[in-house]
Amino acid sequence: MEKVLLITVDLESDAERWPVDDIAQELGELVLACKAEVVDNIISVRKKATPNFFIGRGKAQEIGLISEELGADTVIFSHDLSGTQQRNLEEAIGKKTIDRTQLILDIFARHAKSPEGKMQVELAQLQYLMPRLVGKGLILSRLGGGIGTRGPGEQKLEVDRRRIRQRIENLKDDLKHLTLHRQTIRKKRRENRVSSVALVGYTNSGKSTLLNALTSAGQIVHDALFTTLDPLTKNLKLPNGERIVISDTVGFLHKLPHNLIEAFKATLEEVKEAGLLVHVLDAAHSKVYERHKAVMDVLNELSLNNIPIITCLNKTDLLEDKVWLANLKADFVNTVEISAKERSNLDGLLDKIQNSLPQEMVSVELLVPHSKMSLVDLFYRQGKVLDIKYLQKGVKLRLNLPKPIYQKIARDPSIVIY
Ligand SMILES: Nc1nc2c(ncn2[C@@H]2O[C@H](COP(=O)(O)OP(=O)(O)OP(=O)(O)O)[C@@H](O)[C@H]2O)c(=O)[nH]1
Ligand SMILES: [Mg+2]
C-alpha cells in the first residue's frame, strides 16, 4: 500500500477559510478513498502562500526529512499548487508531491465505471495537466498520476502538447455525442410530461442510499467519498399516482476543482433539467452548515439556483440531540427529516416532493365514453373545463388538467385523447 504524508496548510489569506481540523480530516478521507495509508498529517499555519515553494523552502526541506524518516512514498498538499510550486516542492522534498486536485482526480479515475465517466475524468486530468506542461515536456513523466498509477499514465504523457490538445478536443467531441443521446431520452420524457427530481448533496451524505430506498435501484453505497460518479435515473410513483423520474448524481465537495465541474457538466445536465432538487444533507455531521453552503456554492456555479429545492435532513437515526435537529429545521428552507438507511419517513419525503413539484396544468382535448361519466365531474372539480360537447359516442371536452390526473387519464384506453 502506498504510504502518504499529508500536509494540511492553514492559510490565513484564504478567502473561504475552513477550520484547519476539518481540512485535515477531509484530506485524510480523500486519501482513504484512494486506498493509501496515511503516515502522518502535518499542519502548517501560514499567513499566505509563497509563489515558489508555497510554504517556503525551509519548511519544504523539513518536510523532506520527515517524509524520509516516516518512509512516505508521496506527499500530498491540502491546497492546489501551481506548476512551479509543485516542481520546486518535489525537488526540495525529494518525493512525489501532489496537490488536492490531483488527489481528487485520482479518486474519480478509480471510481469511473461508464465509458462516459472515464472520458470525463480523462478530460479533467488533461485539462489539469495542460497549463503545467513547461519547457519541452521535461517534467511530464513526473506529473503523471497522483497516487498509484491511475493518472493518464506515463506513456500517454510522453506525447507533446499538440497531441494532448487534440486528445482534449476528441474527448469533448465524443462526450458531446453521448450528451446528445441523453438529451433524446430527456426530450421524450418532456414530451410525456414526466417530471424529474435530482438528488444533490455533499459526497457521502446518503444520496445513493436514498435512491435505493425509494426505488430499489441497486446503486453502490459506501462510507467513502465520491462513490457515485455516473448519474442513474429511475422511475418513481408519488402518493397521488403521478409518475416521475429521480436521479442520483456525483457528490459535491468544498472547493470542488474547477476542471472537474467543467468536465462533469454533461453529467450534471440531468440536474439542470430537474423540476425539483432534493438536497440530501448528513444532518448528523458536525459541519452540516459548512457542507450545505459548499453545495449551494456549486449549484450557484452551475447556475442551478433557480430550481425549487427540498432540504432533506438525512441520517436522523444517528441524532440524539433533538435541539440540533430543531435548529436545522429552523435554519434551512423546506426541510424534511428522514433516515435513508432505516427507511424512516420516506412517505413524508414523497409527500414533500409531491407538494413541491411545480404543479403543471396540461391542456388537452378528449372524449369520455358514457360509461366513464363520473370523470367529467372530477374534471370540473380539479381542472378547468373550457369547452364541452355532448356527442353520441360520449362527451368531448377541451380543458386544462393537473398533470397527475392527465397521466392517469392517458393510461385509460377507453378515453380518446386528440
Ligand atoms: N446511519 C445512517 N447512515 C446512512 C444513512 N444514509 C446513508 N448512510 C451511510 O452513509 C454512507 C454514504 O452513503 P451513500 O449513499 O454512498 O452516499 P452518497 O451521497 O451517495 O455518496 P457519494 O456517492 O460518495 O457522493 C454509507 O455508509 C451509508 O450506509 C442514514 O440515514 N443513516
Ligand atoms: Mg453515491
Image (cartoon, grey):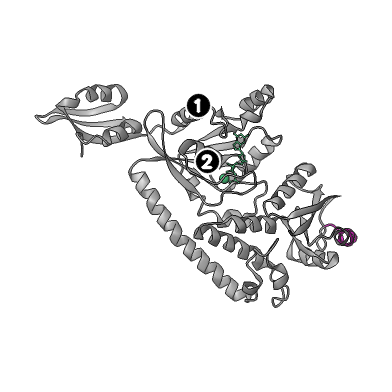
- Type of the residue with mark 2: Leu
Position of residue 56 measured from the top left corner of the image (x, y, whole percent): 86, 59
Residue located farthest toward the front when viewing the structure as drawn: 1
Q: Which mark is residue 305?
A: none
Screen quadrant of the N terminus:
bottom right
Position of residue 198 measured from the top left corner of the image (x, y, whole percent): 50, 41
Residue 65 is a magenta residue: yes
Read off the magenta span.
55-66
Left or right placement of residue 166 versus residue 237 in this view:
right
Position of residue 348 measured from the top left corner of the image (x, y, whole percent): 50, 26
Residue 323 is at least partly visible in this image: yes
Q: Which mark is residue 199?
A: 2
Looking at the image, residue 340 lies above or below residue 222: above
- Number of marks in the rendered image: 2
Left or right placement of residue 180 versus residue 59 in this view:
left
Q: Secondary structure at mark 2?
A: strand
Quarter of the image where ligand 2 sits: top right
- Type of the residue with mark 1: Gly
Residue 308 is a magenta residue: no
Q: Earlier in the sequence, mark 2 or mark 1?
A: 2
- Around disc 1, counting alpha carbons within 10 Å, would you say few (fewer than 14), some (14 to 19), or many (20 or more)? few
Residue closest to the eye, 190 or 110 = 110
Q: Which residue is mark 1?
A: 348
Residue 7 is at least partly visible in this image: no
